[in-house]
Image (cartoon, grey):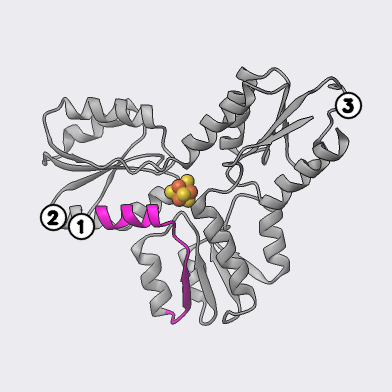
């Protein structure tokens, strides 16, 4: 029985770095330790950190009440205002903002200081976009769909810089930029999409197309895991969506010669390893 585990399964570089930095702080940091927002959308990891004394705070108000301890900024990044509050409250900061997100902060700061209006292609409610907006001088325009492009008509500027949320779909980004381009503005387009998601999806598709069964591991409410599942299912009829090893039930599928395994962006390595071990043991 051949078991193929996707190299890109699980955490991307930025999330791995952020989660590791929290674990690294547990024994060394000025206590108490807080993360600004859950470090990752994975209940088991957040619970484990909570058990080790790491608390989650979610609002500026909560932050303003703190007078000691360490704040860890997660990979999504935060607005400049949050850095200012941390400094004012004299708190220790560990900045685990993904360098790819930090790069966007620097671009929008510089370009807006140079007088350009910033357009962020992304989801307005996403914390990463919230953070990016918070580095723009003045207001940014967030565009998520074609209809949002109307927002540009009422502006009295024609000089723009366009960036993207790192996890935005590339084809949709390209499509929206093409429409904006036709308006004849002076535009500087910086494609800031991170390819970690794309790489994970391409690899999953490739593996799913060559195996007898495919296992996709991830949280129930994880949209990127659902997407991975859909991609795999379209290539391999025997595709299973599981959260942990406990959900694994391959007893109906006995005549397997090969199994592929991948996992969503917020699935920790130990959960993936448990599934891999179990599949290897059973077959
Ligand atoms: Fe991950 Fe950073 Fe890309 S958090 S998805 S490596 S932008």
Q: Nearer the viewer, residue 129 or 173?
A: 173
Q: CA distance from mark 3 to mark 1?
A: 58 Å
In screen coordinates, is 195 left or right of 120?
Answer: right
**Mark found first going from the N terminus, 3 or 1:** 1
Residue drawn at (31%, 31%) of the image: 148
Q: Quadrant of the C terminus?
A: top right
Residue drawn at (11%, 41%) of the image: 157
Give residue 32's position: percent from left, percent from top.
Answer: 61, 77
Q: Nearer the viewer, residue 52 or 24?
A: 24
Which range of residues does the magenta coloring cover? 89-107
Q: CA distance from mark 2 to mark 1?
A: 6 Å
Residues at discs 2 and 1 in contact (Cβ within 8 Å): yes
How many numbered discs sit on the rendered protein?
A: 3
The tag on residue 74 is none
The tag on residue 114 is 2
Residue 1 seen in the current view: yes
**Mark found first going from the N terminus, 2 or 3:** 2
In screen coordinates, is 71 left or right of 210?
Answer: left
Q: Disc 3 on helix, strand or loop?
A: loop
Q: Which residue is mark 3?
A: 251
Give residue 90's position: percent from left, percent from top.
Answer: 44, 82
Give residue 211's position: percent from left, percent from top.
Answer: 69, 23
Q: Which residue is mark 1?
A: 110
Circle 2 or circle 3, nearest the eye: 3
Q: Quadrant of the N terminus?
A: top right
Eyeballing the image, is 233 above or below 108? above
Q: Disc 2 on helix, strand or loop?
A: loop
């Amino acid at each position: 029985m051949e078991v193929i585990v996707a190299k890109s399964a699980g955490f991307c570089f930025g999330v791995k770095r952020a989660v590791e930095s929290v674990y690294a702080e547990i024994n060394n940091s000025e206590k108490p330790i807080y993360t600004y927002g859950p470090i990752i959308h994975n209940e088991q990891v957040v619970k484990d950190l909570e058990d080790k004394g790491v608390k989650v705070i979610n609002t500026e108000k909560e932050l303003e009440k703190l007078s000691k301890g360490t704040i860890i900024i997660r990979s999504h990044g935060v607005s400049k205002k949050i850095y200012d509050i941390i400094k004012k409250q004299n708190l220790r900061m560990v900045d685990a903002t993904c360098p790819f997100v930090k790069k966007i902060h620097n671009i929008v700061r510089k370009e807006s200081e140079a007088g350009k209006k910033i357009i962020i292609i992304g989801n307005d409610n996403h914390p990463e976009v919230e953070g990016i907006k918070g580095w723009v001088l003045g207001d940014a325009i967030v565009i998520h769909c074609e209809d949002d492009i109307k927002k540009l008509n009422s502006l009295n500027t024609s000089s723009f810089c366009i960036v993207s949320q790192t996890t935005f779909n590339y084809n949709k980004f390209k499509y929206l930029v093409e429409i904006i381009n036709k308006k004849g503005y002076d535009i500087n387009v910086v494609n800031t999409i991170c390819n970690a998601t794309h790489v994970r999806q391409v690899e999953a598709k490739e593996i799913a197309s060559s195996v007898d069964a495919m296992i996709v591991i991830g949280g129930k409410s994880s949209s990127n895991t659902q997407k991975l599942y859909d991609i795999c299912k379209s290539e391999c009829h025997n595709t299973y969506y599981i959260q942990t090893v406990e959900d694994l039930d391959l007893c109906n599928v006995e005549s397997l010669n090969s199994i592929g395994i991948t996992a969503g962006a917020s699935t920790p390595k130990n959960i993936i390893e448990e599934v891999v071990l179990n599949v290897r043991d059973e077959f």
